[in-house]
Amino acid sequence: MNEKIMTASKVGFPCDRNIYYAVNGFKGEVKESSQRIFDVGSALEPLIVKWLNQDGWRVFYNPGSQSAALEFYAPINGGKIGGHPDAFMSKLNCDNVLVDIKTMNERAFISWKRNGTIKDKPQYADQLHVYAYAAKLAGFPVDKLAIAGMNKNNSELHIDFFDYEPERMNKIIERAERILNLDKAPEQGERYEAWACSYCDYCKHCELCSHKRDTHVDNSVLQTNDADINNAVELLKEARELSKAGRELENDAKAVLDEKVRMQGVKSVKVNNLILTLSETSSSRFDSTAFKKAYPEIAQDFIKTSSSVVYNVREAV
Ligand code: SF4
């Protein structure tokens, strides 16, 4: 029997069952949309390496994804884990950084940059831990881990550095060994997240795939895989998250400007090609609550009923 291999990019996937299919040689079907996203990421990698070089990083680039020249594998109980890291890079006092290159859409990039890899993209942190674990075993020094991420909407490049944590690696190995030693497909497991089935290549083998549920109405909830509805709900969710992130960014910026500009009595600032102008405004508001309390009968005569729809999006449980 062939030795089972769990690739680093698979290790952090939030469904045990998906990983079971992958390590046991089930034939997956990569969706065209996923393949294209992957292709764009691969095509942009050399460009990102070039930008890192321009920023002063000495980069050892290991191109070619699954066929890259440099690969590290470490034996564990039931098989081996590892794969092909994207790059090692160094600069001044920052040596031996094991880095993975990722491209992200605006929403994912903002959230990742704000929250960091460990919190926002634990699967990326797991992937790098596996490379580092196997690289160290092979005698390659690794002092730091990093994700070099590019925002596909505006080409911003950001690097998030983090440390190798032995405790995290122990948990990764524990999970990997448990899945490698299963003799039948498990449930999704405690790390399962609702989005997993949308990015899973094994839906055709899996009776738990959420996409296989028929379209039906249950307690006035329409359960459906209609692509248009699916896209629209995702889009609305993304729009809400972007505007929330936008409000938070604006508040962060205003807090700095309040302290360093407004409180100093400055009315206008020029930075590079931007001019910030502060203007005082005041507004008056009709206090309808107080009016209703003071003159309930009169208020009643002026109440006009209109209806609109509020769209709320939340994660299903
Ligand atoms: S289809 Fe969903 S439940 Fe089934 S293996 Fe894939 S991610 Fe897991």
Image (cartoon, grey):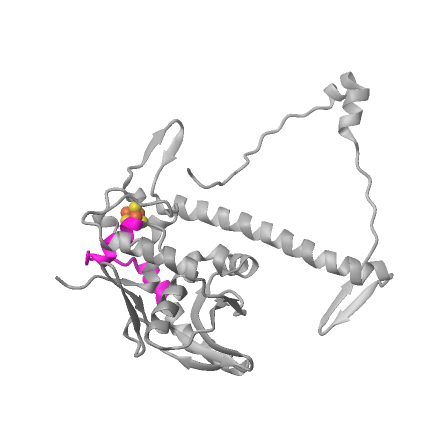
Q: Quadrant of residue 44?
A: bottom left
Q: Position of residue 314 (x, y in %)?
A: 48, 40
**Camera-side residue: 173 or 89?**
173
**Most extreme residue toward the right, as rendered?**
265
Left or right: residue 143 compared with residue 186: right
Q: Position of residue 35 (x, y in %)?
A: 32, 63
Q: Quadrant of residue 269?
A: bottom right
**Most extreme residue toward the left, as rendered?**
1
Q: Is 172 above or below relative to 207?
A: below
**Camera-side residue: 35 or 72?**
72
Left or right: residue 201 compared with residue 111: left
Q: Quadrant of the N terminus?
A: bottom left
Q: Is 236 above or below relative to 119?
A: above
| Residue pictured at 30% horizontal, 56% vertical | 176
**Most extreme residue toward the top, as rendered?**
297
| Residue pictured at 40% horizontal, 44% vertical | 229
Query: In this picture, which residue range is highlighted in magenta?
Result: 16-39
Q: Is residue 32 magenta?
A: yes
Left or right: residue 40 compared with residue 116: left
Q: How many marks?
A: 0
Q: Is residue 54 magenta?
A: no
Q: Position of residue 154 (x, y in %)?
A: 54, 67
Q: Is residue 12 visible?
A: no
Magenta region, mostly helix, strand or loop? Answer: helix
Q: Quadrant of the C terminus?
A: top left
Q: Is residue 154 visible?
A: yes
**Camera-side residue: 4 or 306?**
4
Q: Quadrant of residue 156?
A: bottom right
Q: Position of residue 113 (x, y in %)?
A: 54, 61
Q: Is 214 above or below relative to 195?
A: above
Left or right: residue 114 compared with residue 286: left
| Residue pictured at 54% horizontal, 57% vertical | 115
